[in-house]
Amino acid sequence: MKRVVTAAVLIPVVLALVFLEPSWQWLFTLAVAAVAVLAAWEYIGLAEKCNIHPPRAAVLAALLALFLVDFEWPDHLAAFFGLICLALLVYCTFARPVVEVMADSAASIFCLLYTGFTLLALPTLHAAGNGPSLVVFLLFVVWTGDTAAYYVGRRWGRHKLAPALSPGKSWEGAVASVAGAMLIAAGLVGLATLLQQHDIVILSYPDQLWYWLLLAAIVNVAGQIGDLAESALKRSAGVKDSGSLLPGHGGVLDRIDALLLAAPALWYAQVIHQAF
């Protein structure tokens, strides 16, 4: 019930942000940056349980700077990302005990990549011509796949997917997740077509249906891997949840773990598709 209530509160808020007017793009970016900061805070907490101590303030400041540069000067993002990673290395070199520099600098830079660079895919996708539709596609594919895996896995799961990482996940749930993602993708494309027939242009999914079905499968698999990756990080730190901010869902990192790989997967897929 906690999971349902939390989702019922958060989903309308998220969708409201997605469908903001283009002039409010900054607010969507700010919201994603806030989520990234919360996720980074929890990641650093996991690192500290492994006796690794990334400089929290420096990492969070670097994360916010990354989003600012992406919003104001997106063409310079790659250069700035490299610069800020080197800056974190220099900071750790002089601010941390010498025996901790290797681990602390590595964890700092990885935190910036894992919770920051990955989520930059969201404002980038949102700024595209059919950006809100792409973000809705991403969110519903991840949410539906997660829900299908949870309930099918609990009821019919017999064959463990990755017991060393997440004992509760099964191959049956994984297959159900992909199927659910493809079904919701077909539903979104169908809904967009129906709305456009009535001159309601809220959703837009050009290209053939098969493209969106294939994309849903790719994004869903990336999301499932992201879920397992975060489970591996938590097990390495010896904890069950990354935090307790979201009732029934654990921490922010627990809630967005799939997005951390699914969002870049959709971003890269769209870049490749547009190139060819």
Image: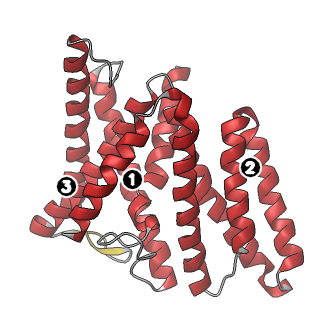
Between the residue at mark 3 and the residue at mark 1, the CA separation in whole angstroms equals: 13 Å
Residue at numbered disc 1: 223
Q: Which mark is residue 148?
A: 3
Looking at the image, residue 3 sits to the left or right of residue 263; the answer is left
Closer-to-camera residue (269/254): 254
> For numbered disc 3, what is the local secondary structure?
helix
For label 3, the crowd category at 10 Å Cα-Cα, with few meaning under 14, some 14 to 19 and many 20 or more, is many
Looking at the image, residue 71 sits to the left or right of residue 205; the answer is right
Query: Vertical placement of 200 versus 188: above or below?
Result: above
For label 1, the crowd category at 10 Å Cα-Cα, with few meaning under 14, some 14 to 19 and many 20 or more, is many
Nearer the camera: disc 2 or disc 1: 2
Closer-to-camera residue (229/140): 140
- Sequence order check: which comes first, mark 2 or mark 1? 2
The answer to which image quadrant residue 44 occupies is bottom right
The answer to which image quadrant residue 254 occupies is bottom left
For label 2, the crowd category at 10 Å Cα-Cα, with few meaning under 14, some 14 to 19 and many 20 or more, is many
- Sequence order check: which comes first, mark 3 or mark 1? 3
The image position of residue 127, as x and y in percent, is: 53, 30
> For numbered disc 1, what is the local secondary structure?
helix
What amino acid type is highlighted by mark number 1? Gly
- Sequence order check: which comes first, mark 2 or mark 3? 2
What amino acid type is highlighted by mark number 2? Phe
The image position of residue 199, as x and y in percent, is: 26, 12
Between the residue at mark 2 and the residue at mark 1, the CA separation in whole angstroms equals: 24 Å
Residue at numbered disc 2: 81
What residue is drawn where x is 25% and y is 31%? 188
Closer-to-camera residue (241/68): 68
Query: Vertical placement of 130 versus 30: above or below?
Result: above
